[in-house]
């Protein structure tokens, strides 16, 4: 909750167009990681053509293990991505997310999420948000094989780690 409030506060407090664009970028990244369960590298590679907000989904192309999968988005995530798109601007590529008119650098997602966590007083990484996503699905009663597919895990054993967190 503290982290989510920090992203929302940053959007509200943005005093210039550049700060607003960066705050909207950060918020969209946060929701995709938390409510979509994406890996940081998957977020960096997203293309405009991968996004289908009308169907509330995004296509992950060549994820870990070079597998493609569809990720279903919450209304809040769609809204965050859509709002970011209004300020995205032009760039040198068709990547969904741009920073200073270039595709996201290798560690940019990780660094910006961690920085927001420090401001909110929470230690967090993009991968921890992915864990939270899976654990919330387990807590909601989602079948483990469905979670496996949503997360793009090759082995069920990898997904079972999240049930151990739930059982504690």
Image (cartoon, rainbow, N blue to C red):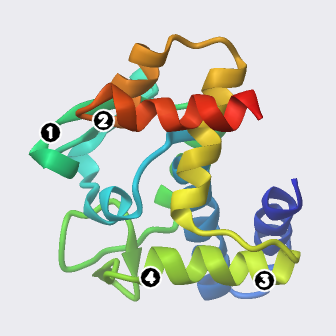
| Label 2 residue SS | loop
Q: Which residue is mark 4?
A: 108
In whole angstroms, how far apart are the C-alphas of marks 3 and 1?
33 Å
In whole angstroms, how far apart are the C-alphas of marks 4 and 2?
23 Å
Q: Which residue is mark 2?
A: 152
State if disc 1 and disc 3 touch (CB < 8 Å): no
| Label 1 residue SS | loop
Q: Which residue is mark 3?
A: 118
* Vertical arrangement, residue 79 with respect to residue 115, above or below: above
Question: Which one is in front, 92 or 159?
Answer: 159
> Tag 3 or tag 4, which sits nearer the N-term?
4
Instruction: State the image coordinates of residue 79 (x, y, percent, origin top left).
Output: 61, 42
From the image, state whether disc 4 or disc 1 is nearer to you: 1
> Tag 1 or tag 3, which sits nearer the N-term?
1
In the rendered image, which quarter contains the C terminus?
top right
Q: Which residue is mark 1?
A: 67
């Amino acid at each position: 909750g503290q982290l989510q409030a920090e992203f929302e506060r940053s959007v509200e407090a943005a005093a210039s167009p550049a700060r607003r664009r960066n705050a909207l970028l950060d918020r969209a990244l946060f929701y995709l990681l938390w409510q979509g369960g994406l890996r940081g590298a998957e977020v960096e590679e997203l293309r405009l053509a991968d996004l289908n907000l009308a169907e509330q989904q995004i296509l992950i192309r060549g994820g870990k293990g070079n597998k493609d999968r569809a990720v279903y988005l919450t209304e809040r995530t769609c809204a965050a991505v859509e709002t970011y798109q209004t300020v995205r601007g032009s760039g040198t590529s068709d990547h969904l997310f741009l920073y200073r008119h270039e595709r996201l650098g290798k560690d940019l997602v990780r660094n910006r999420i961690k920085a927001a966590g420090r401001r909110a007083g929470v230690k967090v990484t993009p991968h921890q948000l992915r864990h939270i996503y899976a654990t919330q699905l387990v807590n909601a009663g989602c079948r483990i094989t469905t979670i496996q597919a949503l997360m793009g895990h090759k082995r069920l054993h990898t997904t079972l780690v999240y049930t151990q967190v739930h059982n504690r």
